[in-house]
Image (tube, rainbow, N blue to C red):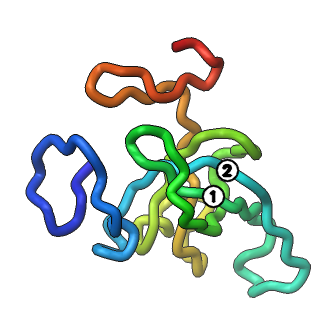
Amino acid sequence: MRFCGEPAVKHHGWPSAVRNSCPGENMLIAKVVGTLVSTRKEESLENLKFLVLKQIDPQGTETGAYVIAADAVGAGVGEVVLYATGSSARQTVMTDRRPCDAVVMAIVDLWDVDEKIKYHKYGRA
């Protein structure tokens, strides 16, 4: 994963403005904190489930930034997920040719930073 505006080297922390520094080139980690329901929407968005995500940093701390994302993998509230933004968000089977700017594309099972487990889906550390 490369952080926009920086060379492709190992990072020990994420820049504070990753989300806005390079729209369309981000793959980020977030926690699902809610759902969004819309009964009236653009026709191509029918049958999409929307999730409310809260970004988290490399230490697993919520950053305060919220994102609404289409769910391509069946994630649920409380799960940690990987999501993409920008044009990458329209490259899943579920979001192809749909006006989406963020998509959940993976549910995280295990996450470690510098050989330390930051998250394990089943609580094992």
Residue under the image location 63 percent in, 53 percent down = 72
User: Amino acid type of disc 2?
Assistant: Val
Residue 1: percent from left, percent from top: 27, 48
Q: Which mark is residue 95?
A: none
User: Alpha carbon of mark 1 to alpha carbon of mark 2: how far?
Assistant: 5 Å
96 vs 6, left or right, is right
29 vs 67, left or right, is left
Say what secondary structure mark 1 lies in.
strand
Residue 81: percent from left, percent from top: 56, 44
What number of labels is visible?
2
9 vs 47, left or right, is left
Say what secondary structure mark 2 lies in.
strand
Marks 1 and 2 close (CB-CB < 8 Å): yes
Name which quarter of the figure residue 58 lies in: top left
Residue 119: percent from left, percent from top: 52, 28
Front residue of 65/107: it is: 65
Q: Which residue is label 2 attached to?
A: 32
- Can you name the residue that lies furthest to the top here? 124
Where is 76 relative to 86, above or below?
A: above
Where is 98 relative to 104, above or below?
A: below
21 vs 118, left or right, is left
Residue under the image location 54 percent in, 27 percent down = 109
User: Amino acid type of disc 1?
Assistant: Leu
Front residue of 32/25: it is: 32
Q: Which mark is residue 53?
A: 1
Callout 2 crowding tier (Cα within 10 Å): few <14, some 14–19, many ≥20: many
Residue under the image location 49 percent in, 50 percent down = 56
Residue 40: percent from left, percent from top: 87, 85
Name which quarter of the figure residue 98 lies in: bottom right
Name which quarter of the figure residue 48 lies in: bottom right
